[in-house]
Image (tube, grey):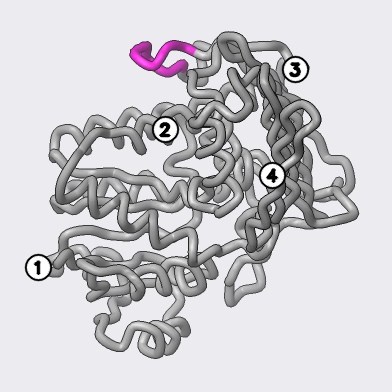
């Protein structure tokens, strides 16, 4: 039985992670902490066996912990991961894992030195429609993938649970960025797995199409170039509807992800599969978190292949390069090979 603690009790923790932990075998949440003492009541109600701590320092001093689940805003991820690793704990963390290649390098070095797992919540792999699409691609139903298109359409940013009425997603000092940070991370790891190769180049344009008063972008258009394939991505908080749509095209057919319906077209033959819930339904997805727990526990207790951290590392790099590309007017930038050092702010 692995004993863990949750740090941060916002929407994603209470509505996504807690149900997932409670539904999982071999793990137990024994401690929780949040900066807002008013959340103690919800912690007691949902995790009556977990001990409340007013500070992270006090929580990390508990003996017998095996891991922490970091559910705080992005600016705190790297410091909290570092402190947990220093205490010899494994770490599961919400996306984005960290906000820069420099933070990533520090986390990777410390995890290797302490021989501990750092695992990011890549829950969109487990959305029923995404999972089924990945299976069909592996089975060769569309042949060799040559083109992926993705659209995430929202009318506004997702709300956050903050007693002060402040949405941290809109503060670049806390979130790191807007729609690209919030949704681009998921698209990067899903598309990369569908195509099955590391991208060679990226270009992007970040804009404010509707919410001009925001300090972060409300729209991102991103183009990824792969060996023999390409991906076009549109992410926006400036749409008139809430919907997700994607298409995976190959030399033998195409898969269309219509939010909650998957359509395979091969010549004149068309097959459809209902895949509820819709990708755009909600933002916490507790059903998608349970398999994340299984993957994390498997890496901690059995096979440490580092695949998740490698995937997260690519997402950090792609967001960093996308922002730099936008600053340069959409200029395509090379994506370094996996073994090469990630570019710093000054070197890009």
In this rendering, the count of numbered labels is: 4
Sequence-wise, the earlier of marks 3 and 1 is 1
| Label placed on residue 330 | 3
Is residue 207 one of those drawn in magenta? Answer: no
62 and 225: which is toward the camera: 225
Determine the secondary structure under disc 1. Answer: loop
Distance between mark 3 and mark 1 Cα atoms: 50 Å
Residue position marked by numbered label 2 in the rendering: 311
Sequence-wise, the earlier of marks 3 and 4 is 4
228 and 180: which is toward the camera: 228
> Would residue 203 appear left or right of 191 to someone viewing this image?
right
Sequence-wise, the earlier of marks 2 and 4 is 4
Residue 280: where, in percent of width, then height? 70, 57
- Badges 1 and 4: C-beta atoms under 8 Å apart? no
Sequence-wise, the earlier of marks 1 and 2 is 1
* Quadrant location of the C terminus in the rendered image: top right
Distance between mark 1 and mark 4 Cα atoms: 39 Å
Residue 156: where, in percent of width, then height? 78, 57
Res. 141 visible in picture:
yes
> Would residue 237 appear left or right of 250 to someone viewing this image?
right
Is the residue 196 above or below the residue 176 in the image? above
Q: What segment carries the magenta color? A: 336-343
Is the residue 131 above or below the residue 340 in the image? below
Residue position marked by numbered label 4 in the rendering: 179
Residue at 60%, 21% (x, y): give it. Answer: 143
Instruction: Decide: few, some or many residues near mark 4? Use Cα within 10 Å; few <14, some 14-19, many ≥20.
Output: many
25 and 30: which is toward the camera: 25
Residue position marked by numbered label 1 in the rendering: 63
211 and 200: which is toward the camera: 200
Hey, which quadrant is residue 105 in on the image?
Answer: top left
| Label placed on residue 53 | none
């Amino acid at each position: 039985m692995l004993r863990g603690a949750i740090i941060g009790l916002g929407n994603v923790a209470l509505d996504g992670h807690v149900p997932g932990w409670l539904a999982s075998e071999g793990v137990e949440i024994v401690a929780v902490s949040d900066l807002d003492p008013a959340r103690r009541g919800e912690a007691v109600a949902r995790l009556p066996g977990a001990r409340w701590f007013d500070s992270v320092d006090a929580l990390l001093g508990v003996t017998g912990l095996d891991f922490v689940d970091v559910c705080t805003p992005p600016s705190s991820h790297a410091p909290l991961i570092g402190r947990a690793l220093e205490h010899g704990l494994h770490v599961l963390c919400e996306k984005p894992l960290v906000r820069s290649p420099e933070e990533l390098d520090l986390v990777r070095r410390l995890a290797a030195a302490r021989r501990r797992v750092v695992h990011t919540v890549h829950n969109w792999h487990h959305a029923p429609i995404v999972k089924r699409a990945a299976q069909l691609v592996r089975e060769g139903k569309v042949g060799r993938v040559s083109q992926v298109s993705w659209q995430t359409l929202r009318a506004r940013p997702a709300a956050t649970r903050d007693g002060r009425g402040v949405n941290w997603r809109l503060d670049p000092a806390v979130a790191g960025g807007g729609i690209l940070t919030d949704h681009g991370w998921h698209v990067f790891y899903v598309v990369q797995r569908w195509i099955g190769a590391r991208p060679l180049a990226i270009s992007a344009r970040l804009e404010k199409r509707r919410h001009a008063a925001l300090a972060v972008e409300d729209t991102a258009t991103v183009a990824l170039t792969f060996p023999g394939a390409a991906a076009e991505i549109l992410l926006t908080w400036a749409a008139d509807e809430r919907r997700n749509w994607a298409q995976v095209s190959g030399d033998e057919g195409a898969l269309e992800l219509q939010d909650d319906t998957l359509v395979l077209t091969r010549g004149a033959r068309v097959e459809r599969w209902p895949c509820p819930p819709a990708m755009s339904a909600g933002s916490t997805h507790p059903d998608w978190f349970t398999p994340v727990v299984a993957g994390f526990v498997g890496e901690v207790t059995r096979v440490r292949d580092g695949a998740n951290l490698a995937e997260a590392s690519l997402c950090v790099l792609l967001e960093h390069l996308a922002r730099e590309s936008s600053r340069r007017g959409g200029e395509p930038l090379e994506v370094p090979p996996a073994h090469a050092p990630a570019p710093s702010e000054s070197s890009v």
